[in-house]
Image (spheres, helix red, strand yellow):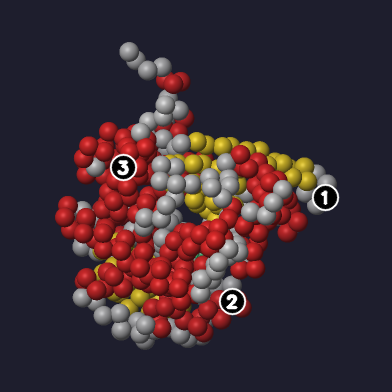
Amino acid sequence: MLEHPSAIPSYLDPNHLGPWGTFLQQVDRVTPYLGPLSRWVETLKRPKRILIVDVPIALDDGTVTHFEGYRVHHNLSRGPGKGGVRFHQDVTLSEVMALAAWMSIKNAAVNVPYGGAKGGIRVDPRDLTLGELERMTRRYTSEINLLIGPQTDIPAPDVNTNEQIMAWMMDTYSMNQGKTATGVVTGKPISLGGSLGRHDATGHGVFVMSGEAALRLGIDIVGARVIVQGFGNVGGVAARLFADAGAKVIAVQDHTGTIFAGGGVDTRALQAHVDSTGGVAGFHGAEAIANDAFWGIETEFLIPAALEGQINEHNAQRIRAKVVVEGANGPTTTGADDILHDRGVLVIPDVIANAGGVTVSYFEWVQDFSSFFWSEEEINQRLDRIMREAFTVIWGVAEEHKISLRTAAFVVACTRILRAREVRGLYP
Ligand code: NAD
């Protein structure tokens, strides 16, 4: 019998898939490696549930405006949903669906007991006053109250959201519940049950994963060249850790420009410059070069730590790095991924390279439940162990099947998710 076209959910319409379409392609790639578990693969191709909410707020001038918000649960087979909240004018349902799905993969790839979730509001937060931002955050939190909770779905910061926004979300949820619930979000201020080490965790994880790759490729970190796109929370911390370990950070690009210093930049001086001026442009310890020249620089490590889709079919052929370590989410297009693979450039995929953040978020959540807080040293030791174990397992699968680390990470993650799906069985 022919399926009636209206029976196809809009997010499966092949003409309008967006980032969700990229995720579906990635799932198709791993399906041949899933053996008998592949009979459950359709479960990954459909988000478990999608909530679209209207977020009306009164602006400071008394007028009322409406924003569109989302919270998506992609898969909860392995535990409660976990994933950030993004405030950006370009947020779409397709993007939130894809980001939720990548959280399912990331959490399973590093084996933290969470499913995948993500949320967002279609808004440019720079257009709002602080009061308006708080009202929008609180109303959004109330609207997604149906889905979130310490045992069900735990949001965290993402693009344009920070620990203040997490504090407002935690307070709003707690007010609605009539009791303080610190474990409902992670990435909170330390004074509200946040974790030591969370700020540096993602950059720290990027550095640990780079070290694992260096060991296997015979690259010495001391003296290795590093180029970084994005000098924010992820790129800035990773660059500092590389430099502290004796590597040379020879080029940095951000939204203000690109700088180059063959002998390596002083990353702490650069951080001070970025903190005071807002970007790398104008830094005295390096020369300014054209943005496009960044991609052709010969280097051991290239760390994209800014935006999606930065390594694409246009620049992938020119990249002269031995290893690409994806600090950002989705920085490499599928086409560029294939070009890099064919050219022998090792890509450490985002789902493991930047998983340090969610791993320490997991530690924060555990600490909130036990109301017992660990030292930064304990956090980093546990973080290193989880990251190294994940890398070793995924490296082994890549070698066994002669596949890329990205496909291997998906094989490991999808196997864990679908095995949970299978042993739980289908309800009812
Ligand atoms: P951030 O806002 O702290 O820094 C972003 C950096 O990107 C800034 O240096 C900015 O100048 C630069 N940038 C922006 N537009 C650019 C452009 N057009 N060209 C070059 N550089 C540009 O953000 P962040 O927290 O460091 O996140 C960066 C990426 O890492 C994002 O993709 C995010 O989703 C991902 N990520 C972050 C975390 C985390 O814990 N912060 C965890 C996992 C993944």
For marks 2 and 1, give the CA distance: 32 Å
Residue bearing the label numbered 3:
419
What crowding class fits label 1: few (fewer than 14 Cα within 10 Å), some (14-19), or many (20 or more)? few
40 or 95: nearer the eye?
Answer: 40
Label pair 3/1, CB-CB below 8 angstroms = no
**In this rendering, would 262 be left or right of 378?**
left
Q: What's the residue type where badge 1 is placed?
A: Asp
Q: Secondary structure at mark 2?
A: helix
Identify the residue at image location x=47%, y=30%: 10
The type of residue carrying mark 2 is Asp
Residue 308: x and y in percent read: 44, 55
User: Which residue sits at x=74%, y=45%?
Assistant: 57
Q: Quadrant of the C terminus?
A: top left
Quarter where residue 251 is shown: bottom left
Q: In x, y percent, where is residue 390?
A: 31, 61
266 vs 333: above or below:
below
Q: Which residue is mark 2?
A: 275
Q: Which one is closest to the eye, mark 3 or mark 1?
A: 3
Can you identify the residue that label 1 sits on? 61
Pointer 2 or 1: first along the chain: 1
- Kindly state the secondary structure of the residue where label 1 is placed: loop
Image quarter for residue 13? top left
Q: CA distance from mark 3 to mark 1?
A: 54 Å
Mark 3, Cα crowd under 10 Å, few <14 / some 14-19 / many 20+, is some
- SS at mark 3? helix
Residue 425, horizontal then vertical, whole percent: 35, 33
